[in-house]
Image: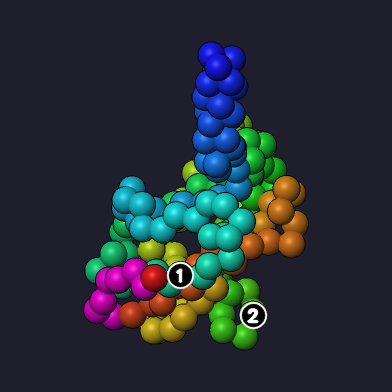
Amino acid sequence: MKKMLISLLFAAVVTSLFSFSPIGGEGFEILLNNNVIMQRFGEKKMNEVQSIHLTLQQAIQPVTVNYHHCGKVAKTRIIRLKNRHGKMVKEWRFADAATAVAAMTCQVKDILHANKGKEGTFNLFYTSSELPTGRLLSLVVVSQNTLAVNK
């Protein structure tokens, strides 16, 4: 009876450990002015697309992307901003990461200038040597007077 109880307890512990996301899984975070405004981890969540809204009032604030490659160090990291027709309007290239997660930062004004100060919607893409086909991270809505995150 005691062996059976220990076996069941062991099975319950092992099962609960595997029910969580694996350590070092793929995912990303987007921060605005050092505040997390979007996070996606896990296969199902990674395919959900969410919009972030940026305004002229936020021009001097930094936008940071942290991409997690299952614990791997990323190389040839690129963030691209594309218009609604898929044409690239801005590209940021970043040095190879020294750690498994390394920040990629630009300013909101760089995104606003990419659309010449006009309102519009863009696609924010990430690529690296570990993810050569790239991933759509978010829609970026540039507007004159609103700040919001649409889920």
Q: Is residue 33 left or right of residue 114?
A: left
Do the residues bearing badges 1 and 2 touch, measured as CB atoms within 8 Å? Answer: no
- What color scheme is it? rainbow
| Viewer-side residue, 95 vs 127 | 127
The quadrant of the image that shows the N terminus is top right
First in sequence: mark 1 vs mark 2 = 1
- The residues colored magenta run 144-150
Q: Is residue 58 left or right of residue 113?
A: left
> Going by the picture, which residue comes out furthest to the front?
1
- The extreme top residue here reads 2
Side of 35 relative to 107 (left or right): left
149 part of magenta stretch: yes
Q: Which residue is mark 1?
A: 50
Give the residue drawn at x 53%, y 14%.
2
**What residue is drawn where x is 58% and y is 60%?**
44
Q: Nearer the viewer, mark 1 or mark 2?
A: 1
Picture coordinates of residue 133, whole percent (x, y): 74, 62
Residue 136 sits above or below residue 6 on the image: below
Q: Mark 1 falls on what kind of element?
A: loop
Of the residues shown, which amino acid type is indicated by label 2?
Gly
Residue at (52% x, 24% y) in the render: 9
Question: Could you say where residue 24 lies in the image, as x and y percent from the top left?
Answer: 59, 37
Number of numbered labels in the structure image = 2
Q: Main secondary structure of the magenta part?
A: loop
Question: What residue did someone put label 2 on?
Answer: 86
Q: Amino acid at mark 1?
A: Gln
Q: Position of residue 140 (x, y in %)?
A: 45, 72
